[in-house]
Structures are given as C-alpha cells and as structure tokens.
Image: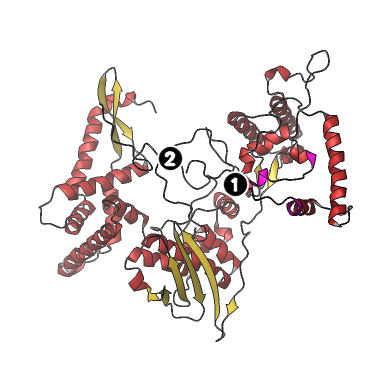
Amino acid sequence: MAAPSAAGLGRRLRAWLPRIMPVRWSRYNPSYLEPEVKKESYQKPLEELTEEEREQVELKAVRPIRAAPPTLSSSVFSDPMISKFTNMMMKSGNKVLARSLMSQTLEAIKRKQLEKYHKAPENEKETIECNPYVIFHQALKNCQPIIGLSNITKGGKTYQVPIPLTDNRKRFLAMKWLITECRDNKHRRTMMPEKLSQELLLAFNNEGPVIKRKHVLHKMAEANRAYAHFRWW
Amino acid sequence: VRLICTTTAVQRKNAGASGPEKYTEAFIKKQIEEFNLGKRHLANMMGEDPETFTQEDIDRAIAYLFPSGLFDKQARPMMKHPNEVFPEQRKIQWGEDGRPFHFLFYTGKQSYYSLMHETYEKFLNVQKHQDQLIAQGLPLQKEKRNLAGSRWLTKIELEEMLLEKLSDDDYSRFIQLLQKLAALPCADVEENYIQKFSKEVPVQLQKVVIEPLQYDEQGVAFSTGEGKRKTARATAVVYDNGTGKITVNGTDILHHFPVLQDREQLLFPFQFLGRIGKHDMVCTVSGGGRSAQAGAIRLASAKALRSFVTEKEVEFMRQAGLLTVDPRVKERKKPGQEGPRRKFTWKKR
C-alpha cells in the first residue's frame, strides 16, 4: 500500500522510496501530473468551470507537471487514438514506416469517399462522410466489444466466463482485431494502407470480418451466461 | 536506475530510533560550551569580531585552516553546533524503580499511539460541538480549507517530531484520521491542532526566474534558451519580427529533420502560443538521436519564448508539459541479464 502522496517540494520531493522496489516504476515522482496539451482548455475563463474543475486548476498550479511525450502535440493533426493505432502497427520500433502507412491509409479512405461522393446523385451527397478521421473513430467505435470472455479455472476445468471490459481494453481489442485482420487475410500483393482503408470503411458501415468477430464474441458470451457467477470481482 | 532520487534526508539515520540516551544531558551541555568557546577562539584567530561570527564564517574558516581534498563533504573537517551533530534523543522512559512514565510504554510505539488518541479526542470534540450546534438549530460553517495550498507532514518529518520510528501503514492511518478531522464542517474549533501537522506549499511553482529580453544591433529583440533530452543538448535563440524561419546547426529544418514528427515537435511551442509566423529561430544541437534532438530543441525554444510572453501564458506552457525536462534516460544493462529487462533464455538443462 503506497504512502499518500504529499506535494512536498525541495528536498522532500525526492525523498519518496517505496519499501519494495516495484518492477514497473517511472523516473517521475508520483506527485507529477499529466500534461494538458489542448489549447481550448486554457481559454475558458474561471467563471465557467464547475467546482471540481476549479479544484483541478488549483491543484495544477501547485504540483509539478510531466514533460509532454514526443507523440503529443497541440496541433490539429495530432490525435491520441491515431497515435495509439500507429504505435500498435509499428514493428521493431520503425515509427517512420508506421506513420507513413497510417497517412497513406487516411489518404486512401479520403480518395475512395470522394470517388463515391462525385458519383452519387444529389440527394445522397450529404449522407456520404468524407472526413477520414471521423470514419476512423466511428469504425473503431463500431468494432469495440461490449463484453469479453476470460479463462477461469474452477475444479480442474477451465471455463470461458463473460466479464465486463474497461474502456481501454475495448479500444485495445478493436485496434488489435483490425490490425491482425489486415495482416493475415489479404492477398500477398495488396499493400497495408489499401487493405486497412477497405476494412475501416466496412467497419464504418457495420459490415466486414472485424464486426463479425465482435458478434461471434458476443454470442459466445451469451452462450456462456451460465458461468457468469464464477466471476468474483 | 534503482535508487533514483535519494537525498541525505532519506539516508540519514532515523532520529531517536537509536534507543534511549547515549549521550547524557551534562555531556551535551559541556559540548555546547566548548563549541561556543571554540567559536570565539576561531573568530579571534581569523581577526573577526567574536560577537558576530555566523555559522557560514565558521565553515569558511575551517575550510581555510584545514583544506581537504576528500570527495565526501561529510568526511571533511567540520565544526557545527552540537545539536546538529548529536541527533535528538529520547530521554530514558522509566524511573529509578523501573516503572515507565507513559501509560502506553508497553505498546512499543508510545508517542504514535498517544498521538492517535489525542487526534481522536479532538475528532470527538468536534462532533460534540457539531451536535450542540444542530441542537441549537444554528447553521454549520462550511468553510472549505484550501487543500491545494497546504500539505501534510511527510513520514520523515513526523518521525522527527515524535522521535520514534513509524511504519508506512501507521503513517497513512494517521494522515487518514487527520483528513477525516479536517473534512468535518466545524473543524475550525481544532484549527490550531491541525495546523501543527500541515505545512504551506508555495502557491505557484514559478520559482524559475524569467530572463528579460535582449536586443541586438538592429534593435531586434531576442532571447536564448537551453534544453536537453536523453543525451542531446540544444541551445536556441529566438528572434522577434521574424517570418517563421528555423535554422538548425546552419541548415534548414527540412534538411536536418526529414521526419514529420520531429518538425511537429519543433513547432509545438509556437503553435501552442499562436506565434507561428512571428518568430525566427537559430539553434545548435549535438548528441542524442533524431527524436532526442527534436525534444531538446523544443525545450530550448519553450524556455526562450518565456521572455516574450505574459506570466499567465508561461503557466499554461508549464501545464502543457513544455517546460519540464524529460528525465527518462536509457536504463542500464544489469549483470546476469541480457538487457535492462530481458533475461537470458531459460534452458532446462
């Protein structure tokens, strides 16, 4: 059980040492807070904030803040979801390649949507979504499972028990399914951006193999409803 | 790095936990007299006035008379007041017949438990006061204590106060009790008691001095900043009335940073303040890799921009994480392992 964090400064700031050295540690003192990069949050005047936000502002004024990581920026083009997806696509630390694949994917999506837009009749033009970021976010949202399965061993046998998932886990599963789907089930000659844009557009319309996988998971969870009481947390 | 941030505060032996008196009171008194006498002799030797001879003067005199090349400052000759040299001790807790003075002596942590008892007594007091107010029908005062401006004593400070060793668990229980007490509506009754255990935190973390703008020959305002990240060191000079041109080590940034992410990082401080086309920048950078160099220049330019901008915006920059030095460095390889975390392949035989 960690000792409560005191926002001590000067020498006291560094004198934090847990009894047992944990494996996952950070070079930052635990009193350092996460940085807030978006410009809009700093332009709100004090009166419009709620009580909690006011307390947050006061706390931020006193505590030290961590440095912003290199992937985070206040420009309109940096999106945390896209960065997360790029990192997951990255192999052996080749961020340059992953980033270029991502930008080619978004370009491919835009091109396909524009083609559709120009071919469509007048009344349908408004329903076609051209913004690749919106398509990406919506597709990811559609792919996220609501309930997950976990292996619980009871009495020697392992059962698949339905469990609720946290937001982070849902996002991770959606992204992981998309990437594995694009890497495995494609023709040898198709490039990753093309296949990814295809998958994202299908997921945006709630079709495609990734959505099918999500439905399969949901059905398994429904089938194993009887074991739901095995969960103890 | 295992022991990341330790200071002498942590490594110093716990005050009072070394057991009952090792030095008698008479001994300490004699030491104090000798110290004062020695101070006057020293002042005489150095030709200074014995009445106004401060501790700094003593340190300087000793360093002059006994020069030492030892690396550890604690190993060099020093002359300090006996209260600093001999740690505060607890006097012997029992009388001549062997009977202890304090009723909680046999718990082992008498000062801690007596403190908890006292705090709980105050808690019950406040509740009684609250009940009285409710009975009389008067409204309860709901003044919220300014939590952000004060902090509780750390475990080490509490140990020094009690002259007794505490465990993490004990300390957190005490802090929880204090928080409960402070959260009650009528806690103002015991405000004095609570203030004994809380300390002021400087309201703004703006302890850094912002340098004023300098002006070069043409009258253009400029300012410099230094930054570092991993092994890269960078200096940036930001000029006013510019067109947004950035030069790194004599070459254009497109030439030096072919990757988009690095250029984005360079522009981050300017974009955050909304001053993209208004400043020119000339930087020099050495060491590190491409991302480390970009991070170093970002920090240097953010520090340089502080002089051009209002204090509020400096605070916004700090809260966006632009002004903190990133402490993350490459973790060292350990013996018996292949890398910092990766172990050798486990072979069954």
Residue A160 lies in what quarter of the image?
A: top left
Q: Position of residue A230 (x, y in %)?
A: 33, 24
Q: Residues within 10 Å of mark 2 (few under 14, many from 20)?
A: few
Residue position for label 2: A24
Give the prevailing secondary structure in the magenta stretch: loop
Asked if residue B161 lies left or right of residue B171, the reply is right
Q: Chain of mark 1?
A: A
Q: Are both tags, 1 and 2, on one chain?
A: yes
> At numbered mark 1, what does the secondary structure look like: helix, strand or loop?
helix
User: Does B68 appear in magenta?
Assistant: yes
Taking the image as shown, residue B345 lies to the left or right of residue B130, namely left
Which region of the structure is painted magenta? B63-82
**Tag 1: Cα neighbours inside 10 Å, few (<14), some, or many (≥20)?**
some
- Image height of B301 relative to B222, above or below: above
Q: Which residue is mark 1?
A: A13
Query: Looking at numbered disc 2 in the image, what kind of residue is underneath it?
Result: Arg
In magenta stretch: residue B77: yes
Mark with earlier residue (1, 2)? 1
The three-letter code of the residue at mark 1 reads Leu
- Quarter occupied by the C terminus of chain A: top left
- Residue B118 shows in the view: yes
